[in-house]
Image (spheres, rainbow, N blue to C red):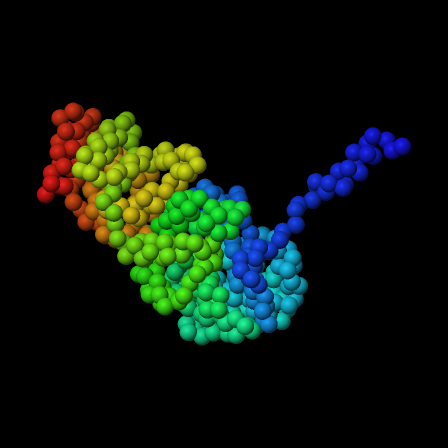
Amino acid sequence: MLPRSAKIHKKRGNDRKDEPPAMKAIEITKGIYWVGVVDWTLRSFHGYTTSRGSSYNAYLILDEKVTLIDTVKHGFENEMLERIKSVIDPEKIDYVVSNHVEPDHSGGIPFIMKYAKNAKVVTSMPNGLKGLRAHYGEFDYQPVKTGESISIGKRTLSFLQVPMLHWPDSMMTYCPEEKILFSNDGFGQHLAASERFDDENDLSIVIEEAQKYYANILMLYGRQAAKALTDTKDFDIQMIATGHGVLWRKNVAKIVELYKKWSAADLDEKAVVVYDTMWHSTEKMARTITEALRECGISVKLFDIKTTPNSVGYYDIKKNPHADIMTDILTSRYLAVGSPTLNNQMMPTIAGFLTYFKGLSPRHHKAFAFGSYGWGGQSIGLIEDELKAAGCEIILDKIRIQEIPSTEQLEEIRQSVLAYKKA
């Protein structure tokens, strides 16, 4: 009879609890597999918070010429390799298509090329070729341009360069036989999910994360996004295989229409009020402005930049709330920004927000500045200058109140907002 300890050891060995589960490829349509990675713990990307994680999507097409479309971020290559191995020997890969040089998509290329020794790396000409060489050195490159295609057997892959969406090298790949657009950063979301498709997830969350992604990465390139939509309008697209997040199959038309709206800066009758405060005086002004906008029939969101909520909790002051604020600004016509004066300047939190806002080249927004002050009051003028520099139309003169706003002064602010809308 075995001792008790031996029995326990044997049971644990049979259960294999000390080993990770095998990573399997997921078939998204006959002969085409998702072989990417879900990054459940990612919380920051490009300077904005990714509270729901992300994924790095790669796709394997089994045909006469086995093709891998995109890879994964460095550090996740083994998981991608294991998924590939679950359906085919990686040495049989003939093409590795790199739609985008950025390392969260191309980081796995040097790793996979150790196995796919005879594969050609397909990339955009000239910027994809230039970028991959700069990052990873020499491989057997096959540069392509818009309109060019390669036959991989019963399927064809056609290429569309989408420069500055959001790097100069960016490219999309379309498979007409399967009616799939491999869109890389277009239409994506930073969203970790165990299910791969839009209709398998809460659509409201998928849309929210797609809007956040567009607002913080692609808003700056709205005109390029609009051109990409024009260039793909004749494609019969039944599935969008994104570079991040979940794939679109049931709501393809919906996300395309949203991209048309966002890229055109077609704004809704909504408002965002952003402020920081020291002793609650600017906060009182912000709340008064919020209520006045609401009285005008405008849907309003109020953000104290130190405690901006997101979908899963609250940020502390050390974190970056800009991404969540920009998600609402993307579709809002009105913006009010307030700060008290500190050392002849606006609060650093507001200065940082305005720098982030201006960098995304917003369009068609109507805005104004407000704030309280003790003696100098320079912050309000500085905010207005930044709003103008960002391309905003200033609709109300600077709202400045020294010390603590009185009831009468708050009523004057309210009346000013109401008067603008009446006019």
Quadrant where the C terminus sits is top left
Name the quadrant containing residue 108: bottom right
Q: Is residue 47 visible?
A: no
Compared across the picture, whether 105 is left or right of 326 comes to right
**Which residue is painted at 20% across and 38% down in the image?**
297
Q: Residue at x 65, y 57 (%)?
A: 86
Answer above or below: position of 140 versus 251: below
All told, the count of numbered labels is 0
The N terminus, quarter of image = top right
User: From the viewer's perspective, is residue 288 above or below residue 73?
Assistant: above
Q: Image check: 248 left or right of 369?
A: right
Name the residue located 41 percent from the left edge and 61 percent from the top edge.
167
Residue 155 at x, y percent in the picture: 52, 71
Q: Give me the residue at 36% from left, 54% from top.
A: 254
Q: Nearer the viewer, residue 199 or 138?
A: 199
- Could you tell whether 16 is left or right of 152 in the image? right
**Residue 281 x, y percent position in the rendering:** 24, 28
Task: Where is residue 141? Give x, y as percent.
Answer: 54, 72
- Decide which of 296, 386 is in the foreground and name it: 296
Q: Is residue 204 above or below residue 304?
A: below
Residue 268 visible here: yes
Up/down of 254 relative to 48, above or below: below
Residue 109 position in % (x across, y down): 56, 62
For this orientation, the residue located farthest to the right is 1
Decide which of 422, 104 is in the foreground and name it.
422
